[in-house]
Image (cartoon, helix red, strand yellow):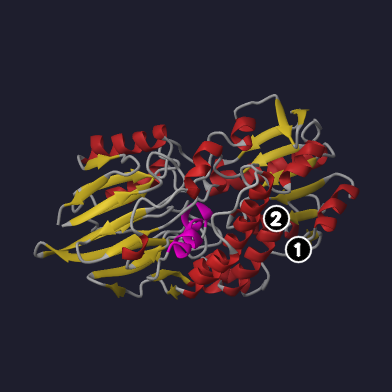
């Protein structure tokens, strides 16, 4: 009997964590941080709702912390199996987990408590970690596992697990986060046409993105409008994928004189480290990006770009007069250097705050997009006079149409679909669409729910 249990990402976007038990082998797929207001984040510190040392392996879909953020805690609590992911995911994880620990330590000091993992736990996890290539199948117990391209960020993977059970081969597929293809940097997500059970994300299960041409045009127009007014364009950016996409497009804009040349700051040490890793895995790039590399060997650099790693360099950005562009973490404005820039320019009517990624409920980014007239930053209330913009097409997540299409490819073989990693409205909308149009048993599981998978 094959069972599937949901220990995160269930009726919520973050905390992805799923256990597949074949009866002979126990696999954990993802082990991410819960990211939301404080009452939810406390869940990260609680004991795992399963026996850690009975797990045979952990399979990770990609390196965002809502998918890997509790891996060191797993190592701390006596996990001794193997950890598998693509090679870029392992490299990204090393810097992402260290950065996340820095945030946890800062919070712990302010609240007089101890972080739930340490640098030693990160090192232990990395020692158990094996990087594998796309499409190279490997065996864990009675499960054959293949990682395929999810098109979300560099090295992101669809996890395909085949188990021989009940006299037949059963294929279970976890999408992780499914990418918003086409993407200028990485190859489009693979399709799978013969899944029997599917666990699919739903962050944008009820929304449709702009096309790539429309999003680029919007970005160009926002840059022009802000710079013409003499303002500052602030972009809260996620360190993986979005920052690199922005650099790629800004390079094109400046090279072809589509926007005025102004100083551009990447004010995020994590983004700078992540961009260096991108340069090591150019074979993962899209065909178009690899073609550009033949004539331009650095897609992420151009005159006027400044990388500010130190605190002193970050503070010096204030001395550079507008107009200028500042790309800084964190993407949802729940922390990071973007808050310092917002504190300075959010009340400036000439400036623009541009969101290009998902904004979770309760985040400052979400409140600003929803029309907040003031923002509390570092204990100070500021009037929101800057222009607030959002471009959904830069999301690294598939939209409602792409998610539905992914399911539809396996409509003749699917016995069940589980919709995860979405807010209630988004997950419910996608599940209902699948039930209505494809007549497949589909549900939105709750935390702790267990399902028996038909062979």
Residue 302 placement: quadrant: bottom right
Numbered range of the magenta stretch? 64-77
Furthest residue in direction front, as rendered:
112
Q: Looking at the image, how many numbered discs can be counted on the residues?
A: 2
Q: Residue placed farthest to the top in the image?
A: 373
From the image, which quarter does the N terminus lie in?
bottom left
Q: Earlier in the sequence, mark 2 or mark 1?
A: 2
Circles 2 and 1, Cβ within 8 Å, touching? The answer is yes
Could you tell me which residue is drawn at 83 percent across and 36 percent down? 229
Do we see residue 430 in this rendering? yes
Q: Secondary structure at mark 1?
A: loop
Q: Which residue is mark 1?
A: 302
Question: Image check: 165 left or right of 138?
Answer: left
Mark 1 is surrounded, within 10 Å at the Cα level, by few (under 14), some (14 to 19) or many (20 or more) other residues, namely some
Vertical comparison of 382 with 52: above or below:
above
Which residue position holds label 2? Answer: 250
Residue 140 drawn at (x, y percent): 29, 72
- Residue 2 found in image quarter: bottom left
x, y percent for residue 45: 50, 49
| Residue 12 in the figure: left or right of residue 55 | right
Which residue occupies the foreground of this view, 443 or 232?
443
Q: Nearer the viewer, residue 118 or 443?
A: 118
**Magenta stretch encompasses residue 439:** no
Locate residue 263 relative to residue 330 in the image: left or right.
right
The quarter of the picture where the C terminus appears is: bottom left
Mostly what secondary structure, the magenta segment? Answer: helix
Tag 2's secondary structure? Answer: helix
Q: Residue furthest left?
A: 167
Residue 100 x, y percent position in the rendering: 60, 56
What separation in Å lies between label 2 and label 1 (alpha carbons)? 8 Å
């Amino acid at each position: 009997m094959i069972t599937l249990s949901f220990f995160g990402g269930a009726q919520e976007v973050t905390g992805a964590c799923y256990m597949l038990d074949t009866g002979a082998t126990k696999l954990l797929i993802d082990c991410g941080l819960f990211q939301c207001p404080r009452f939810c984040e406390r869940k990260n510190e609680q004991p795992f709702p399963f026996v850690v040392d009975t797990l045979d392996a952990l399979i990770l879909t990609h390196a965002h912390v809502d998918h890997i953020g509790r891996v060191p805690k797993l190592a701390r609590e006596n996990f001794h199996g193997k950890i598998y992911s693509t090679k870029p995911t392992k490299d990204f994880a090393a810097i992402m987990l260290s950065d996340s620990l820095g945030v946890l330590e800062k919070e712990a000091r302010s609240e007089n408590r101890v972080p739930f993992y340490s640098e030693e736990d990160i090192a232990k996890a990395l020692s158990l970690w094996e990087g594998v290539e796309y499409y190279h199948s490997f065996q864990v117990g009675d499960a054959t596992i293949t990682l395929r391209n999810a098109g979300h960020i560099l090295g992101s993977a669809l996890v395909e697990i085949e188990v021989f059970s009940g006299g037949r081969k059963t294929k279970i597929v976890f999408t992780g986060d499914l990418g918003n293809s086409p993407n200028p940097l990485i190859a489009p997500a693979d399709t799978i046409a013969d899944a029997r059970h599917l666990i699919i994300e739903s962050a944008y299960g009820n929304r449709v993105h702009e096309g790539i041409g429309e999003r680029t045009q919007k970005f160009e127009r926002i840059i022009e409008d802000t710079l013409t007014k003499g303002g500052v364009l602030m972009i809260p950016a996620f360190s993986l994928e979005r920052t690199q996409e922005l650099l790629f497009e800004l390079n094109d804009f400046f090279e072809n004189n589509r926007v005025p040349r102004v100083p551009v700051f990447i004010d995020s040490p994590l983004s700078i480290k992540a961009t260096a890793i991108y340069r090591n895995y150019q074979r993962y790039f899209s065909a178009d990006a690899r073609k550009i590399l033949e004539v331009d060997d650095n897609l992420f650099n151009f005159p006027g770009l400044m990388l500010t790693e130190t605190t002193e360099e970050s503070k010096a950005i204030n001395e550079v007069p507008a107009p200028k562009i500042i790309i800084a973490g964190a993407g949802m404005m729940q922390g990071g250097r973007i808050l310092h820039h917002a504190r300075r320019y959010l009340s400036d009517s000439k400036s623009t705050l541009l969101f290009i990624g998902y904004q979770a409920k309760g985040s400052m980014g979400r409140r600003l997009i929803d029309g907040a007239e003031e923002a509390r930053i570092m204990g100070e209330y500021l009037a929101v006079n800057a222009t607030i913009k959002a471009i959904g097409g830069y999301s690294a997540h598939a939209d409602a149409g792409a998610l539905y299409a992914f399911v539809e490819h396996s409509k003749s073989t699917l016995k069940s679909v589980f919709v995860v990693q979405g807010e209630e409205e988004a997950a419910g909308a996608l599940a209902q669409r699948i039930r209505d149009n494809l007549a497949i048993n589909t549900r939105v599981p709750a935390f702790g729910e267990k399902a028996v998978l038909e062979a």
